[in-house]
C-alpha cells in the first residue's frame, strides 16, 4: 500500500485535522452570531439592553455594532439585522463563508 506522509503523519490524517480545525472555527463563529441574534430578539423593545449588546460587539464586530447603534429605535430594522445574522450564521456553518455578512464580518 502506498502512503503519502507529511512529516511523520499520513496525508489523510493531516487533511482530516485541517478540516476539523476549519470546521470548528466556523462552528464557533456561527455559534457566537446565533447568540447575538437571540439576545437581540429577546431585547427588541429594551433600548438599554440593546445598548449593552452594541457595546459588547464594538470591538469584535464593529460594523454590526454601528448598524445597531444607527437603528436601535427601529424594531423592524433590528428584526432585519437578526434575520441577516441568522442567515449568515447558517452560511458560515455550512460552507465556511457568508455572502450575506461580508460587509459585517471578516470571515476567512
Image (cartoon, grey):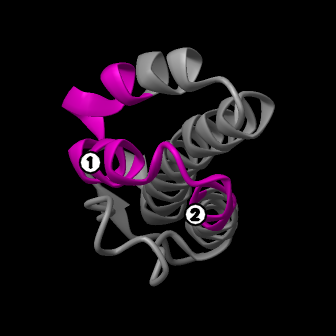
Task: Report the disc number at residue 77.
Answer: 2
Q: Is residue 44 left or right of residue 25?
A: right
Would you place residue 34 above or below residue 22 in this image?
A: above
Image coordinates of residue 94 in percent, x first then y, are: 68, 71
| In-front residue for pair 44/22 | 44
Judged from this view, the residue extending furthest toward the front is: 73
| In-front residue for pair 94/79 | 79
Q: Quadrant of residue 62?
A: top left
Would you place residue 68 above or below residue 44 in this image?
A: below
- Magenta-highlighted residues: 54-81
The mark lying in front, picked from 1 and 2, is 2
Would you place residue 27 above or below residue 51 in this image?
A: below
Which residue is painted at 64% across and 39% down in the image? 31
Image coordinates of residue 38 in percent, x first then y, are: 74, 36
Q: Are marks 1 and 2 in contact (CB under 8 Å)?
A: no
Which residue is painted at 20% across and 28% down in the image? 59
The residue carrying mark 1 is 66
Specify whether residue 77 is painted magenta: yes
Would you place residue 3 above or below residue 105 in this image?
A: below
Amino acid at each position: 500500500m502506498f502512503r503519502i506522509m507529511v512529516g511523520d503523519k499520513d496525508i489523510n490524517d493531516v487533511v482530516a485535522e485541517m478540516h476539523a480545525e476549519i470546521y470548528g472555527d466556523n462552528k464557533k463563529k456561527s455559534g457566537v452570531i446565533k447568540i447575538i441574534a437571540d439576545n437581540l430578539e429577546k431585547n427588541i423593545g429594551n433600548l438599554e439592553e440593546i445598548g449593552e449588546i452594541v457595546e459588547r460587539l464594538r470591538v469584535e464586530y464593529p460594523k454590526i455594532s454601528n448598524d445597531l447603534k444607527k437603528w436601535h429605535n427601529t424594531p423592524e430594522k433590528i428584526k432585519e439585522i437578526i434575520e441577516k445574522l441568522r442567515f449568515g450564521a447558517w452560511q458560515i456553518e455550512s460552507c465556511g463563508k457568508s455572502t450575506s455578512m461580508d460587509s459585517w464580518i471578516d470571515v476567512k
